[in-house]
Amino acid sequence: MADLLYPSGPLVSTLVVSPAGLSLGCSLPALTLAVPGALGFPDVQPRGMWRERDVRRAVAELLEATGAFEGLYTGPPERQGQRNDSRAVWVEPIASTERDSWDAAPTGRIDITSQLKITVLARDEIQQIRDDAAEYLLALVNNALNGTNLGGLTMPQFTRVQSWRWKDAAPPERRIEITFGFRYLLDTWNGFNESE
Amino acid sequence: MAASGIQANWTGATHGADAVADVQSCTISDGKQLTAFSAGIDRYKRKHAALMAEPSIQITSSDVAKIMSLTGTKDFSITLKDAFGASGGDILYAGENATPEGASTNGSHATFASASVTLRLASDDGATNPLSFTRA
């Protein structure tokens, strides 16, 4: 998922799949990428040392696997010089909240709730077609992501789309902003992964 | 750092060899029961005597399986931390002959479940308080 690190172009064109196949569901303990580091990705982190960026990558992988998007970005495509996709999606972080749910602090676990903004875009000259397509993409995002274990980190019970907002149509575009929530645990208060 | 003199958060809960993690709350009761005395034309109680006490400990944790599986009569201990985490500020509670009673599980939608159990403490000789606490 190079474009989530290097937002310079559509993700789908630079996806690297290992010879054994890239796991798009996240049930395996580790994803295997061909030639780690080849496109600038660091090696995948061991379980328990994941970062929120790994969750965003897992989201991107699942969205890419739908095959419905021409472009998958880390921000609005126009900011990256892309204005021609008929169907596009981008994933951006919003905010996280840390909660201390148990005693034994600061060696106890910490509970983190996070939100992402996922924006889908449909482009068509005909209003009905673009609105229907945008809603179709919204349904795809729900079905692809709800209840998943993203990047080996998130709890499926708390991983789902929380809300969405239709943006005013800007013909020939229609966008829907989706707020997506997930939750994960760290084993200790100082258990964040510091790898860059 | 000097101890704060106030306490926050539990740690190190054990029942025999069973460690209870993810403690959410713990209540320690000295279980003292006062018996009141009055006689004759008294309209108020004239004496309160502590004739009997039954200390107990109630603990709630997200470690549901552990709470529900506590069994047998074993010593229990738990530490109430100093709010600054300073040495000398913790309170170590020790309960002898702790027998679990009335374990229950509670889980609400979209929240972490928890389980609670009451441990009733018994004295070895009938005269020594089975509940003790020390600063450490």
Image: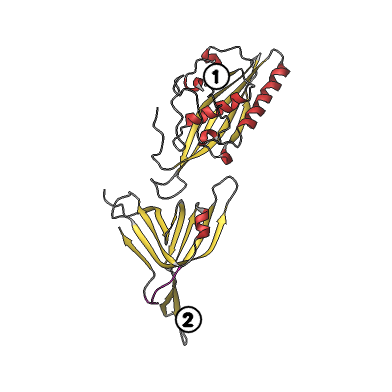
Disc 2 designates what residue? B43
Question: Chain letter of disc 1?
Answer: A
Quadrant of the drawing holding the C terminus of chain A: top left
Query: Secondary structure under badge 1?
Result: helix
- Residue A172's disc number: none
Residue drawn at the location 60% of the way across and 47% of the way down = B109
Quadrant housing residue A160: top right
Q: Alpha-carbon distance for marks 1 and 2?
A: 86 Å
Query: Closer to the camera, A164 or B43?
Result: A164
- Which residue is most to the bottom? B40
- Which residue is most to the front? A19
The amino acid at mark 1 is Leu
Mark 1 Cα within 10 Å, few/some/many (few <14, many 20+)?
many
The amino acid at mark 2 is Arg
Query: Closer to the camera, B94 or B80?
Result: B94
- In the rendered view, would you say B117 is above or below A37? below
- In the rendered view, would you say A29 is above or below A127? below
- Mark 1 or mark 2, whichever is nearer to me: 1
Mark 2 Cα within 10 Å, few/some/many (few <14, many 20+)?
few
Q: Position of residue A50 (x, y in %)?
A: 46, 34
Q: Position of residue B79 (x, y in %)?
A: 37, 57
Quadrant housing residue A109: top left
- Whether discs 1 and 2 lie on one chain: the answer is no
Magenta segment range? B120-127
Question: Chain letter of disc 2?
Answer: B
Direction from residue B78 to residue A125 in the image, left or right: right
Residue drawn at the location 67% of the way across and 28% of the way down = A139
Query: Secondary structure under badge 2?
Result: loop
Chief secondary structure of the magenta span?
loop
Disc 1 designates what residue? A11
Q: Position of residue A155 (x, y in %)?
A: 54, 40
